[in-house]
Image (tube, rainbow, N blue to C red):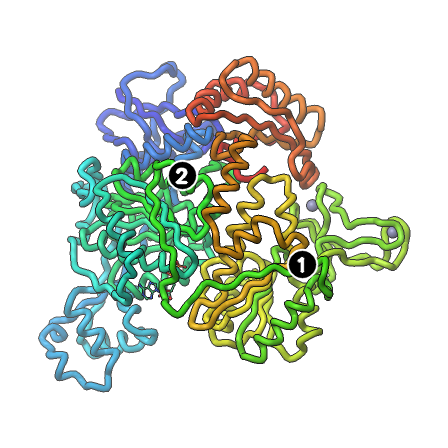
Amino acid sequence: MSIVRVALDVPLPTLFDYTVAEGVSVEVGQRVIVPFGKRQLVGVVMECVATTDVSAERIKPVTQVLHDSAPLSAGLLDLLRFCSDYYRFPIGQTVLSALPVRLRSDKPVISKPILSYRLSANGAALDVESFPKRKVVQRRILAKLAEHPCNIAQIKTLSATVGAQLRALVQEGWVESFTSVHLPSASSALKVRNPLSNKFDAELSGRTVNSIRQHTFDNAHTLTSEQQLAVNAVTQAGGYACFLLHGITGSGKTEVYVHLMHEVLQRGGQVLLLVPEINLTPQLENYFRSRFPDVNLVSLHSGLSEGERLHNWLQAQIGAAQIVLGTRLSVFAELPALALIIVDEEHDSSYKQQDGLRYSARDAAIFRANQRGVPIVLGSASPSLESYHNAQSGRYQMLNLTGRALAAASLPTVRSINITQSVMHHGISENLLREIALRIERKEQSLLFINRRGYAPVLMCAGCGWLSGCKHCAGKMVLHLNEQRLRCHHCGYQIRVPNACPDCGSADLIPVGSGTQRVESVLHERFPDARILRVDRDSTRNKRAWQTMREQIHANEVDILVGTQMLAKGHDFPELTLVGVLNPDSALYSSDFRAPEKLFAQLVQVAGRAGRADKPGEVLIQTAFPDHPLFRALQTHDFEGWAASQLAERQMAGFPPFMFQAMLRAEGKIETELYAYLNQARAAAIELNHPVEILGVVPAALPRRANHLRAQLLIQATSRKALQQFLRAWQSRLDALPAAKLRCSLDIDPLEF
Ligand code: ADP
Ligand code: ZN
Ligand code: ZN
């Protein structure tokens, strides 16, 4: 009798043993249905073993082995085991959460058949030259299909109006459709070799993987010499190497990615491109499709429907998808022919998951590249200090792009406006308003960047000093004047704006500080004829809204943009020549030691929006500290100097990247229970007597959220290994502590404090 050890989506840090009936074959990586308590759960076979500690009376048989998708590869299971161990998260939940939802359910995976098109016998006999010249699109489709059959996505790259033309060709009998089911079955196994790595042979099941074929490549630009050096370095890596591509905004990092992809695709490899923002995926998808018109590119992110995500995941698994573009979860995609990983905007904090498996997709990607023996490129205009430090100490290889790719585009000039010496209009200085007026005259665009949505961050009573606190949280309720609401951004609680102070009855309630709505209304007053567009999470809640706004901006139907960091990332607005930064100062005295690093990265990004085309850009920063080194470094575009000073400070203070940290967080309704748990955890940690530093139990930065009190305990060590060893030992002590009514979590390499 054989026994399988199964990963299940339950919050216990173990695998579960089941028997397999005589004659049933089951492989590691396969999905199975097993009884668990009164339920039937889908799990993944992690090991096949001969014996078990579970007694013969208690062990149960596997209910069913699922054959509707290929088993997970040994490589992916290793990556997941590593993540479970490193991030101290139950193995079963780690494995299952990496799979598309549909693979976690026991419903059979019915992959939608994919409709493809090919020339009919008549069509194949047709001489395209004899086809009417005016039917341009139809001629293009015929020429394309003469090369090879295509699915609809591939045909759509030819023209926007392709649908009707294709139907006409089918009706007239030149083209026929057929279905190809990209459903991997376990019947015929075939080996696919990773063209770059000898180390790794992935076992694949199912249909034949596309043979290596020539693809069309829109080679739009001749690379600059710096770009060429970067491309050469990566292509010559010949195995695992981690590159940090540090390129100023507009230096053409994307062009480097495109050339690297081209090179890998030519050799039949797969590329994984990680991007931070789901908002950016559609435009990037279109961009890469336009550069590689006949390459099969799929995206993976949480905005896809379950069916789409499953389909794309399976495309990657069978090797049919040559480029996988996705947000952090795509780091767990199966990629049998993986030959290159790119992490764009590697510094972005959205690569770190903030709940469940608290993994960093960037770090998991590095593990994966190493495991598979392939190069990885981390790209950024403002690298994280962790990566920058690794590049300086030689663990990563630094690649620099120091000039803008377009000769005409120069870096924007950056100036500070001292708000203590300026005439201010509700948070906007007279100087900045004048500059905006100048841009309106010249028919250029301005952007005001403020990282707060709503009208004002708090409402105050002038009579008694009452502040609009949230009754469920320790934070303040934000005034949303357009909607006449006070809203808590932490827990979502909201109420109508009161007419009078709830404490003293005074009607004299004043909004304190500014958010995007207030900036918008100040601008409306000053520039009544200007077209003003506010871009924040409130104004883009609707799925299509942001897309429509981008089109408006590109069509130059907007004079002034007001927005949060949503606007800062990766967008190219050629008419934009002025960026105003409002209110950046709070980051300078934040208790979060990463706040200045984050601010610097944000300002580099947002400044990079100005003057991308042939018009020089200008950035004005409103601050009470115009001489602060952070703003000085921005003015001189001196990332190196800034990073060096930050790293020196971090080293002095004993912060990452010189320290490795783990945060134990707990939340609960009863203060004594919460602190008892954390104090016992701390006592247990001290008892273990490992070479780690154990800090005190302290309230979280937001000490109460949604009626739960929150506190935390930080552990740090000078080496990753020491911390990991400690955590393994500590884990069993933590599991033994009474914490029934608490929500507890361990966060390794935490980004939020
Ligand atoms: P980044 O991603 O570094 O901000 P992009 O890749 O978006 O920069 O490039 C900025 C602009 O420069 C784009 O319009 C791009 O088409 C153009 N570009 C990039 N590389 C070259 C090149 N070698 N020659 C000419 N133009 C280039
Ligand atoms: Zn009052
Ligand atoms: Zn709240």
Label 1 vs 2, first from the N-terminus: 2
Q: Residue at x 54, y 79 (%)?
A: 443
Q: Is residue 120 visible?
A: yes
Residue 430 drawn above or below residue 698? below
Task: Please give left or right for residue 10 compared with residue 456 in the image.
Answer: left
Q: Residue at x 37, y 14 (%)?
A: 53
Q: Which residue is the site of mark 2? A: 363
Residues 17 and 510: in front is 510
Is residue 348 or residue 544 the one in the foreground?
A: 348
Look at label 2 and name its amino acid. Asp
Q: Is residue 16 left or right of residue 319?
A: right
Tags 1 and 2 in contact by the CB under 8 Å rule?
no
- Residue 145 place in picture, x, y as percent: 18, 69
Nearer to the camera, 123 or 132 = 132
How far from the left and from the top, in percent, is residue 617? 50, 67
| Residue with the mark numbered 1 | 418
Q: Is residue 218 above or below residue 256?
A: below
| Residue beneath the point at 69% across and 74% down | 526
Relative image position of residue 217 (x, y in whole percent)? 23, 63
Q: Quadrant of the C terminus?
A: top right
Residue 30 x %, y %: 30, 35
Between the C-alphas of marks 1 and 2, the distance is 40 Å
Amino acid found under the numbered disc labelled 1: Asn
- Is residue 33 visible in the rendered image? The answer is no
